[in-house]
Image: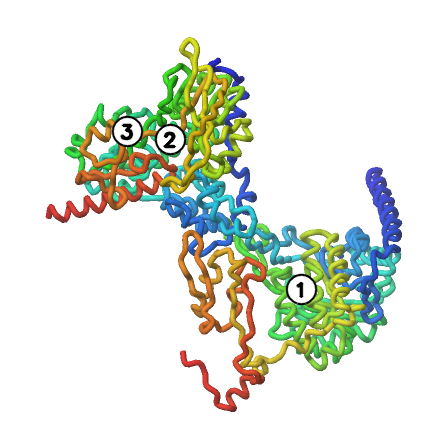
Amino acid sequence: MIKNNRLSEAEYKVNFSDIHPPYTNVNAALVDANRCLFCYDAPCTKSCPTSIDVPKFIKQITTANIKGSAHTIFSSNILGAGCSKVCPVEKLCEGSCVYNLLDEAPIPIAQLQRYSTEKAIAGNWQLFTRKPSTGKKVAIVGAGPAGLSCAFNLSKEGVDVTIYEKESKAGGLMTYGIAAYKVTPEFCEDEVNYILSIGGIDIKYNMALGTDITIAELQAQYDAVYLAFGVGLARQLSVPGENLTGVVDAISFIYELRSKGFSSVPVGDKVAVIGLGMTAIDAATQAKRLGAKEVTIVYRRTQDEMPCTQVELDIAMLDGCKLSWLAAPKEVLGADGKATHLVCTKMKLGEPDASGRRSPVETDETFTLEVDMVIKAAGQMPFEALVNGSSLNNKSGKVSVEDKSVTSINGVFAGGDCVNGGREVVDAVQAGKDGAKAVLSFIATNATNEH
Amino acid sequence: MHICNNSWLYKKLLLIITLVFISDISGKKLKEMANISSNFLGIKSPNPFWLASAPPTDKKINVLRAFEAGWGGVVWKTLGSQVKNVSSRYSAVDYGGSRVMGFNNIELISDRPLAINLKEITECVKLFPDRAMIVSLMADNNRESWHELIKKCEDAGAMGFELNFGCPHGMTERGMGAAVGQDPEIARMVVEWVMEKATIPVITKLTPNVHSVVPTGKAVVEAGTNALSLINTIQSVTGIDLDTLVPNPYVAGKSVFGGYCGPAVKPIALKFLTTISQNETTSKVPVSGIGGVSTWKDAVEFMLLGASTVQVCTAAMKNGFRIVEDMCEGLNNWMDEKGYAKIEDFIGKSVDKITHWEDLDINYHITAKINQDKCIHCGLCYIACEDTSHQAINLDYGKPYNTYTIKEDDCVGCNLCKLVCPVDQCITMEEHRVAPEYINWKQWQEQGLPLNDH
């Protein structure tokens, strides 16, 4: 049965407490920071999409220069605080720490990054000075990681930025789409406010592209436009029974969880989660933590091909989620309009596909799971209709760009999930930086031409 | 009073129990082991590890705890005219997360009444007759004061004396301590006074606050001292509080130079020791080595450069007396491995291995080799060589791991890359002699051989 309010407030509090607690004292941070070898041309930095100078910011912790440390992080990644909580560091910076090659535990880079950035946000340290306003105006669509990163880097250079955001809060998937035990809504709000504290950035909330504003309107009012509207709902299963009550979208499920109180979010007794990306893990673990009795993750390939990291999988398994490998949804059965069973096709691995992973091939065998809730988390869909409604060149709804952020419309730039189809927060931050650079260069060229 | 008595009784009981326990285990030998006992001018101790004259040896309770822990001997904290100490006496240098790499103090000689010190010395010797009991002395600067102090200490049961000619703070301003040790003629005079009276071995402790310890060392040996010990502490400022702007240690808004010791001073101590061991006059007397000894390895190094015993202070102040356990075991195991049956078998064995630069072999040439199987690609060797040495490491960019290789032709064999490499045995220095024959700098010049052309 799908119902809310399954646990006590105390239980919710425990289940959704911070999964990566911060250092409780300076000594603990120093022990880890002092272990850092201060590598040259460091593999951790090279494995960070935003190229944070990791050895430098860690060294700065050891010299009690926390302001410098935070400045080093934010110079490369203005969402460095949030990324320290949500990045899959095991496949990025920490995954390439040279200590791994000594079979030693890597430096806890994320935790150290959190140490410096949290102090900066708590103290509202103003580490950057905005250049005097140039009078140039840029519109950004979407106040997610890419939009915020672009806005900050433009504002820093004296550009007046207006962000149009369809939700009532900024942060994008950071605020609405990530497990609550990784980042809290309060943290997201603090982080956004900290980014905005540089000044020169105005966010207009509840303004959606396509309904409230159009690209053409923005182009008319601004010197340039940056699109960072992200991706939409989870991919359809396209199987019979998909419309039964109880079949929900992971993004909506997490959105609800992030925007309402935990006790008001309904969850089933027996939940199946389709997919094994980060969002699937977030959905499965949170369904369990909301009080679902049984959660089964259904994935069509094997552990060798899974898109989530081992660390993420471990979280789900430690939460008691079950895994059904080599299985694909075939049909959702129901009674009285409500989902009751998920029929799955057993799969086997075939030839490698375009991604290099072996592709799943259907077999004749099926099996059936008893369920009352099915959460769809097999990737997110681009806003195809929205993009097709514009003159933007695109590929199945993903905005096509050249040189990282230049779209087919002159003066319109794009980046983040709306371009790449959905990647990590840290990738979106880098896209925002690239976007700001492209926009600045466009504005400068235009200014030269005008003279 | 009642509580006092009880706690005294309790301690006494504990001591007896401990003594019984020690005598019990000392009877059992684990296996055939080297003999690490020491005989320093007839002063015997079960091991060569003495506690240096310092706060750990300034009263009975500490010294008994040290003997219970297994220390071979103590040099009782310096006795002289009673003084008064300040509060806030120590400060330290931390490095890379390690506490107390260097340590300094501004404590004076014993600030307790002489009579109490003497009584406690007698009691300690009685309880532990097999341990060395050296008493450090710093009498007022006249013959009578020295003679009087020597008599009292000998009566109390001292087995030897150590003359404190080295204390760099507080006492120097009064014409004592380092003020004596820094002037060979004053030192000679005081030692002559002492030797007139003393009937037990006399060790003269040298100050490092001089350009060379040899002149004073020579003077006191000529004056008859039976042995030397070195180094005393080095005048220092360990650091400044960046909020108050007052250097450490902070005493009511002010500070003074303190005596520096601990691991940081060991290399300096070893150098001074070597000069004493290599001098014809000073090498005639045994030496007790002091200066940053923290482990059995440090002790072996001091002994290889000529020390017969070593004295420890900072390491014990940091970690307590229990460190002596590993010092004994480590020394024993090393001696067993190397086949030394007794400590005299290796004392001084490295003294003649330190030579003059002019005698070094110029045809000896080594180059670095990086073991690619062990390399973790941290790049520390590369950046050290590239920025600060000879640009002899090649970098092939990779993502995320670069590959580093040695440019053998450019490598001068400086060792820097090996020193900064965090992986054991990853970088090794391989010998590639320029020519088989030995040639030194003097010969090189005589033969008019070419110098570097770049």
Q: Can you say whether B314 is above or below A390 in the image?
A: below
Residue drawn at (44%, 21%), measured in percent from left and top?
Answer: A374
Q: Which of marks 3 and 1 is in front?
A: 3
Residue B225 picture location, percent across and down = 77, 75
Q: Mark 3 lies on which chain?
A: A
Residue A215 picture location, percent across and down = 19, 31
Q: Can you say whether A127 is above or below A203 in the image?
A: below
Q: Distance between the residues labelled 2 and 3?
A: 13 Å
Instruction: Decide: few, some or many residues near mark 1? Use Cα within 10 Å; few <14, some 14-19, many ≥20.
Output: many
Residue drawn at (41%, 50%), measured in percent from left and top?
Answer: A46
The numbered dot on residue A383 is: 3
For the N terminus of chain B, the quadrant is top right
Q: Do the residues labelled 2 and 1 touch (CB within 8 Å)?
A: no
Per the image, label 2 sits on a secondary structure element best described as loop
Q: How far apart are marks 3 and 1 (CA)?
A: 73 Å
Q: Which residue is the site of mark 2?
A: A379
Q: Which chain carries label 1?
A: B
Q: Which chain carries label 2?
A: A
Per the image, label 1 sits on a secondary structure element best described as loop
Which amino acid type is shown beneath numbered disc 2? Gly
Which of these two is toward me, B73 or B260?
B73
